[in-house]
Amino acid sequence: MARPNRRLALALALLSAASWAADPAPPRTWNLDALLGTLATRTEGTARFSEIRTLKIVAVPLRSSGRLSFRRPDVLEKQLLAPRKEALRIDGDRLTIEDGSADSPRTVHLSDHPSLLAAIESIRAPLTGDAETLRRLFTATLGGSERRWVLTLVPRDAAYAEIVRVVYVHGSGPRIESIRIDEANGDRSEIRIEPER
C-alpha cells in the first residue's frame, strides 16, 4: 500500500513542478533603458542599407545603397556602392572619407564639427546602444512596444537643431529597421536597414 502513495506523491510533485514552470515570467519593463540595453548587447554587425533623400531643390528623390557595419564602442563604416563608390569610416572622433578624388582619403575630427558629430551619433549611438551619448546630444522619447517601436530624437545642441529638426529610429525587438532624419529646411533622408543574409 505504501507504493501507490509514493507514486501519488511523486505525481503530485511533478504536476506542481510542471505548473510552476509553465507560469509566465513577469512582464519585462519596456522603456528607453530596456531598448538601449538590448541594442548594446550586440558588439558588431553588418547590414545592407538603402537611402532616399528628398530635397526641396531637386524634383526627384536621390537614391543610394550600400553596406553599413559597426563595432562597439564607436566604429561605424558606411560603404556606398551605388550610384557611386564612396567609403566613410568613423572611428571615435575621426571621420575618414575615401571617394577616389585626388585628395582622398580625407580625415576630419568630429569634435571640430559639432553638427556633423550629432548627425553621425543619430545613427551610431542607437546602433551601438550608447545611452550616454544619446542622452547628451538628444532628448529621446520611446514609443510603441517591444514588438514595434519608434525612438524619437530631438537635438539638444542649438547649432544642430538649426540643421535637423527630429530623427526617428524605427525598429522591432533588437533590430533597427530604419532611420529618418527630418531637416529644419524641409529636406528629409530615410535609411532602410536590412541584415545581410
Image (tube, grey):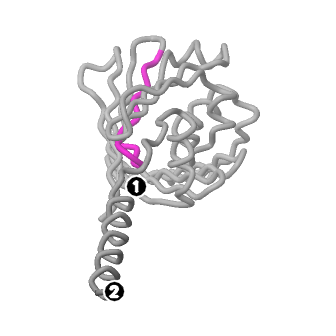
Which SS class for mark 2?
A: helix
The amino acid type of the residue labelled 1 equals Arg
- Residue 96 magenta-drawn? no
Q: Amino acid at mark 2?
A: Ala
* Residue 44 location (% of width, % of height): 53, 60
> Is 180 in front, or is 32?
32
Q: Nearer the viewer, residue 122 or 126?
A: 126
Q: Quadrant of residue 115?
A: top right
Answer yes or no: do the residues labelled 1 and 2 have beta carbons within 8 Å?
A: no
Give me the disc on residue 119.
none
Please report the residue visible at 25 percent of the width from the left and 19 percent of the height from the top. 59
In the picture provided, is 181 more to the left or to the right than 102?
left
Q: Position of residue 90 (x, y in %)?
A: 62, 49
First along the sequence among labels 1 and 2: 2
Which residue is disc 1 drawn over? Answer: 67
Residues in magenta? 172-183
| Circle 2 crowding by C-alpha within 10 Å: few under 14, some 14–19, many from 20 | few
Q: Main secondary structure of the magenta part?
A: strand
Residue 50: x and y, percent?
A: 32, 44
Q: Report which quarter residue 189 is drawn in.
A: top left
